[in-house]
Amino acid sequence: MTKLAGKIALVTGGRGGIGRAIVKRFLAEGAHVYAADLTQQGSLAEHDADGSQFIKLDVTSETDAIAAMERVRADHGRLDILVNAAGIEIEKTIEDTTLDEWNTSFAVNVTGTFLTSKYALPLMRAAAAGGTSSSIINFGSYDGFIADPGLAAYCATKGAVHALTRAMACDHGPEGIRVNAICPGYVDTPMLQSFFTGEGSGGDGKSIDDLQQVVKDVHPMRTYGTPDDIANLVHWLASDEARYASGQLWVLDGGLSAQVQQMKL
Amino acid sequence: MDKGAIVTGGSRGIGAAIVAALDNAGYRVLTCGRGARPADLPASVHWMSADVSKPADAAALVDYASAELGPLSLLVNNAGVQVEKTIGESTDADWDLVVDINCRGVFNMSRAVLHVMQDHGGSIVNIGSISGNVADPSMALYNASKAFVHGLTRSIAVDHGPQVRCNAISPGWIMTEMATDGFALANDPERAMRDAIARHPVGRMGKPEDIANAVLWLASDQSHYVNGACITVDGGMTAASPLNPGLF
């Protein structure tokens, strides 16, 4: 597995559920990986053992974004792969969402993608000057296409990421930079478990296990995804095999959004 | 108003509601079906027994309308059939039935009517389906036939403007006799209906009149700048995730 041999990659949210799986896969494929996140989430030794480099990054901070890219520049002078995986989810309707929560959602999910990409671009241009394209992979969501109830701000931020992805692909394609978005459906992460916990305690007697089974059964594949499923696609989009793939929104949801709602007849 | 309209498949369900709405709005309406004239068809509405899958029948419908109704300004391609099977279960005869009526019928009627409409202008409204965008299980040929209708709608719009506008309506769950029968067969019909309603942000199921209203608007000058569009009329159902209500 050397599909990313010699590539320099940075993954925001790199210590989170999906981000961590991407970091591991990139390392396994031979990339040099920076895992950027708010905290180490564990001992330094544990994460150094996987071979990734930790960068403390609050994606909403312009200072942090500049500092992170300065470090990559000092180490390598280029960046081949950027994955904007950092994201948060507020589980509320717009009526229940406070202005602070709304602003925080956009700051992390949209402004974070903007800032990290903005300051990565000179390094990605430098990488593309070597002859192979560099690749930015944003995190959209199937919620950017169709709405889950009680996730209004999240749905809106992901719709914004979809539009930003296409805009970035148009603007920076001529410079050899590909830009795509992954649009996951239900993926087994701490974020999903928190969603189940929140909903499961909502009352009507359903246990969290019941909820999980109901959700799995609605999927044509009868299960939800794992972070590794997402990493499988992200690593391909990051690789040179995807050299003609750009500007697209890649839905990965076990077929969930291919179907009409199923009436219980 | 002195406008002629053809509505295919107007004997029942959505087609009958479209016929009634156009009749009330003053259109001179010709409708058709494979059987005999329905007893409850308004007296002012013309009827011809015809099979839209046959090019000769399509030509006869347009000839009759041109001779009897005055300038033909509207065609509503509503006639359609569904076969509730996966492709593995579908026979060659199923394919012929669904594709002949849902696809070839729209082609036959549109081609025949364009000869007339290109002279004095007009509007074609096709009945597509949300199933042409997202799949209903065990409806493979029907789903595919409706995606064909959406694609042909865009092609007619692109090729035959400015004289002719062409749009499609994608109905969601409309409570026709066919749908009512489906609910009646449920283990717990009342619970099934509650669940179904919960999946519709408007809080009710669709009525044939909802589709007829959209046809009237697409036929009118109010929609003069709408061309090549597939308008979803489904009470918001497909705006929501399939994981929607009742689950949580």
Image: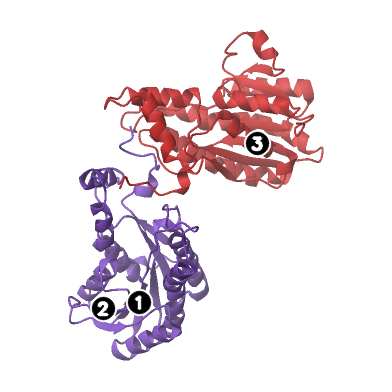
Chain colours: A red, B purple
Please give the chain letter of the residue carrying mark 1: B
Amino acid bearing label 3? Ile
Q: Is residue B98 visible?
A: yes
Q: Are marks 1 and 3 on the same chain?
A: no
- Are the residues at dot 2 and dot 1 in contact (C-beta closer than 8 Å)? yes
Residue A8, quarter of picture: top right
- Dot 3: within a 10 Å radius of its alpha carbon, few (fewer than 14), some, or many (20 or more) residues? many
Q: Secondary structure at mark 1?
A: strand
Vertical side of B107 occupied by B201: above or below = above
Inter-mark Cα distance, 2 to 1: 9 Å
Q: Which residue is mark 2?
A: B27
Residue B138, image x and y in percent? 42, 55
Q: Secondary structure at mark 3?
A: strand
Inter-mark Cα distance, 3 to 2: 56 Å
Residue A16, image x and y in percent? 56, 22
Identify which residue is drawn at 34% across, 33% down.
A93
Q: Which residue is mark 3?
A: A136
Amino acid bearing label 2? Tyr
Q: Which residue is mark 1?
A: B74
- Dot 2: within a 10 Å radius of its alpha carbon, few (fewer than 14), some, or many (20 or more) residues? many
Amino acid bearing label 1? Leu
Q: Are marks 3 and 2 on the same chain?
A: no
- Are the residues at dot 3 and dot 2 in contact (C-beta closer than 8 Å)? no
Identify which residue is drawn at 51% across, 40% down.
A254
**On the picture, is B3 further left or further right than A88?**
left
Q: Quadrant of the N terminus of chain A?
A: top right
Inter-mark Cα distance, 1 to 3: 49 Å
Please give the chain letter of the residue carrying mark 2: B
**On the picture, is B237 further left or further right than A249?**
left
**On the picture, is B103 further left or further right than A80?**
left
Q: Secondary structure at mark 2?
A: loop
